Amino acid sequence: MLLEALTLQLGYNATLVTIGATLLGLTAGAVGTFLYVSKRALVSDAISHATLPGIGLAFIAMVLLGGDGRALPGLLIGSALSAWIGLLCVSWLTHRTRLTEDAAIGAVLSVFFGAGVVLLTIIQTMNTGRQAGLEGFLLGSTAGMLWNDAVILAVGGAATLAALLLLHRSMALVAFDPDYAAASGTNVRRVELAMMGLALAISVVGLKVVGLILIVALLIIPAVAARFWSDRLERVVILAAAIGGASGFIGAALSASAPDLPTGPIIVLIAFAFFAGSFLFAPGRGVLAVVLRHRHFQTRVHVRQGLLALAQAQPIYEPLTLRLMRRAGLIRADGVATDMGRAQAARALLDERRWEILRADPRHEWAAARYDGLTPLETILTPDQLAELDLSLGPEPV
Amino acid sequence: MSSEFVALSLPPMVIGTLAAIACALPGNFLLLRRQALIGDAISHVVLPGIVLAFIVTGSVAAWPMMIGAGAAALITVFLIELIRRVG
């Protein structure tokens, strides 16, 4: 069943939802990277929650004008308008009052969402027909997805990607160095509004598939997961788009393959699985890589200090040092040094003495800055410099 | 809209007032610490806690729900700190 779902053979609706979710994930991942990088990820949460009153008002308006209350284009336009008003409110609260941005986000989010819930409750008691199903916009309702919905998704996603291609340089500049951007003529306020506008477009387009509560997850999680793999913005954007698209594809296929699995939440859980995998296993920045790097460093430090203690005939008490040196074959089981251990200890002591002389000499200031207790001096100085340094080596004090 | 839409009854009003007071007091500290959205995060995370409490106890009584929600909130705070420190 799952294999058929993954190869798009489970029927019209499942295929439509899977392709739509993949497109949404691709676009959301790319846009979300810029939001994450400019530290405005949660403004998209406020935007998506602010779409709810717009949906209710659009429904009421369309019913009062005599049309079909649940026509998707009308609902999406209404949601976009109220989300835009919410965005302007957040911007106004941040720039004109003493509130910080997270307080403004929290206020706008909850007030607009509460107003939306009240409107939905009013709609339920209205005596016009066909008002069931508006709550489907909260968590996504893919069961009744039509060809028109998929077309809206595709067109909206493509337009957002095109806008992203045009604006990505300005958005990156404003995200990383807004002062330089302002000084070199970029209109910072307008670029920020454009970035939020892209987030708004993604929220509106994704209402049907993942719903407004979870669209922020699809914007943030792929970007954060991709961040573990690279430091370069272009690579993070592409990887975030790939992770978003993959979670959309796998999540939609998984929810189609078994009964009673909601699509939006499953997509978010798959994205979280990607995040957990990246968090733990990304090479270089993942938890496993950090732990291994720390243990490698710890081993080097312990072995170096153990060798210095051997060379100076000092006893070693630390059990970890003894264990590491035994494992490296530098001491025997009873703590007496082997031949290799004595040779390496002598070399370590020579290196340490050379460093001592170097650091006391003001002519070698640039090399002295590279002392970290582990780097051998032979890798920094040339042989004739080392020979000149060795002339200052005196006999060991007894 | 029927005439019963805004039904004024005392218990929900008292509960609402007391809950709002109880939420507003710690909220001052969250605002000053710039952690206003932790409230949003915790309120979303109590949902699996409540569902798990229902699955485990099989009843919708208040105490199991609250214990489940509280446990989920604690796990949330722990996970937030973990990701901030390690990630």
Image (tube, helix red, strand yellow):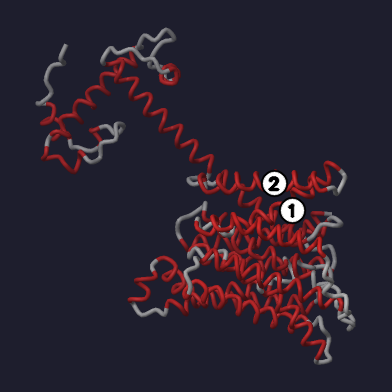
Among the two numbered marks 2 and 1 on one chain, the one whose residue lies closer to the N terminus: 1
Query: Which residue is disc 2 drawn over?
Result: B72
Query: Which residue is disc 1 drawn over?
Result: B47
The residue sitting at 45% across, 56% down in the picture is: A231
Chain that bears disc 2: B
Three-letter residue code for mark 1: Leu
Relative to A397, say whether A116 is above or below.
below
Side of A373 relative to B69 (left or right): left
The residue sitting at 54% across, 39% down in the picture is: A288
Element at badge 2? helix
Element at badge 1? helix
Q: Position of residue B20 (x, y in %)?
A: 68, 60
Three-letter residue code for mark 2: Ala
Q: Position of residue B10 (x, y in %)?
A: 81, 64
Q: Position of residue A98 (x, y in %)?
A: 47, 69
Chain that bears disc 1: B
* Residue in front for this viewpoint, A327 or A206: A206
Side of A320 relative to A114 (left or right): left
How crowded pointer 1 is (Cα within 10 Å; few <14, some 14-19, many 20+) is rated as some
How crowded pointer 2 is (Cα within 10 Å; few <14, some 14-19, many 20+) is rated as many
Q: Position of residue A36 (x, y in %)?
A: 52, 62
Decide: marks 2, 1 in contact (CB < 8 A)? yes
Question: On the rendered image, what quadrant is the C terminus of chain A found in?
Answer: top left
Mark 2 → mark 1, Cα distance in angstroms:
8 Å
Single out the residue that lies furthest toward the bottom: A65
* Residue in front for this viewpoint, A15 or A103: A103
